[in-house]
Amino acid sequence: MSVDRDQVLRSAAAQLTRKGSSTLDEVARASGISRATLHRHFAGRDALIRALEDLGLQECETALDLARLGEGSAQDALRRLIKEIEPAAGLLAFLVTENQLFEGEDRHEGWSRIDDRMAELFRRGQESGEFRIDLSTAWLTDALYGLVGSAAWAVLDGRVAAKDFSYMIAELLIGGAQRRVES
Amino acid sequence: MSVDRDQVLRSAAAQLTRKGSSTLDEVARASGISRATLHRHFAGRDALIRALEDLGLQECETALDLARLGEGSAQDALRRLIKEIEPAAGLLAFLVTENQLFEGEDRHEGWSRIDDRMAELFRRGQESGEFRIDLSTAWLTDALYGLVGSAAWAVLDGRVAAKDFSYMIAELLIGGAQRRVES
DNA sequence: CTCTCGTGAGACAAAATTGTCTCACACGGG
DNA sequence: CCCGTGTGAGACAATTTTGTCTCACGAGAG
């Protein structure tokens, strides 16, 4: 029976998220396959990481597409995006810690495109008056990444319920922690 | 001339933040010392990480003390905390990615104490009516970590100005991205 | 059934990393 | 000046990780 490449990648991401210095053997075991088989599918550690990056990129693009960022209010679009990105949260939580990907001058162009699409959403919200303009789109984008990663970790560690994932992020990012009297 | 242990630790943190899998030789070079000297001060990689953890813990405790979380409104206390924690942000950005520290059952008790102090601040804010109660203190605490880490990265990468550090975090965490008409 | 394909297990060498040691040198105090 | 301390450079072995290979096994197709 052929291994499910996609499933292997997800298991590998989970293992590497827990322990970034995991041995290829540990990664293979976590995926339920042998090191030999892992090596048949991915030439080496680098190739594995690149495959994870590609998968993460693809899932982000998909989420961005599904969220239809251009439709409706920017706020609603952002809520949709957060909901759609949830399946990729675990993978993202790993990739954002894999700073190696962002160091080389050959940083995958895909990330720029994703960043741009997110920043564009925030910019649209700012122009429509929905979002405040004293927080830059770059910061809002980074903050979204950070909150998604934190939420993914909080869920993994059992500190918060998985069902609250998108609500927590969206409410905090949009409304903040401050309580409002009424509105 | 004796090496400045504190300075070595900061350089090491910077290097390891950029590349978590840095060789001890790379870490030593980044600190401007030789591998031999690095090894004289820290028995090995583990010992180095532990020392970084201890330094981070100590800086967090200091920030928590300086912020005087019990005084004034919870919101003001939170703003003070964010301001005081800025010097430790780089170190924190590394430590939060060093999941290894949080995996073993012997997770450093110091982090629990810090988490508790932060959660206590949020709880106080909730009880006083300043903070909303539909976002758990655990999530608010994790979100704070995430935003601090994201902000540290954004500054390191030059996407945002260092002087905006505490403003960006505090404004987003407390007020959110939504624009308010007036209040 | 037989054959093929993909896999698991393990051996093996190559490469990378680490831990330990020695030695020479520079600096600063006495 | 002389000496002690701490350092840099590098050699070296031990350990770990990786890349590559072989072989046997089992499931599934024909």
Image (spheres, coloured by chain):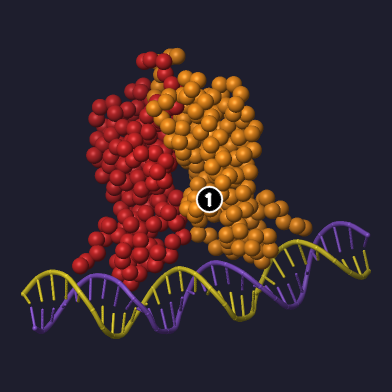
Chain colours: A red, B orange, C purple, D yellow
* Amino acid type of the residue tagged 1 in the rendering: Arg
Is A139 left or right of B2, judged from the image as shown? left
| Left/right of residue B13 with respect to residue A31 in the rendered view | right
Circle 1 residues within 10 Å: few <14, some 14–19, many ≥20? few
Image position of A85 (left or right of B124): left
For residue C27, what is the image quadrant? bottom right
Secondary element under disc 1, as helix, strand or loop, is loop
From what the image shows, is residue A19 above or below residue A68? below
Q: Please give the name of the residue rendered at 40% of the width and 64% of the height, measured from the top-left corner.
A: A26
Against B98, residue B173 (above or below) is: above
Query: Which chain is mark 1 on?
Result: B
Instruction: Examine the rendering and report whether any part of residue B113 can be seen.
Output: yes
Residue underneath mark 1: B107
Res A115 → quadrant:
top left
Question: From what the image shows, is residue B104 above or below residue B77?
Answer: below
Residue positioned 65% across, 58% down in the render: B32
Relative to B158, residue C13 above or below: below
Horizontal and vertical percent for residue D9?
A: 67, 70
> In the image, residue B33 lies at what x, y percent?
67, 60
Give residue B107's position: percent from left, percent from top: 53, 50
Quarter where residue A127 is shown = top left
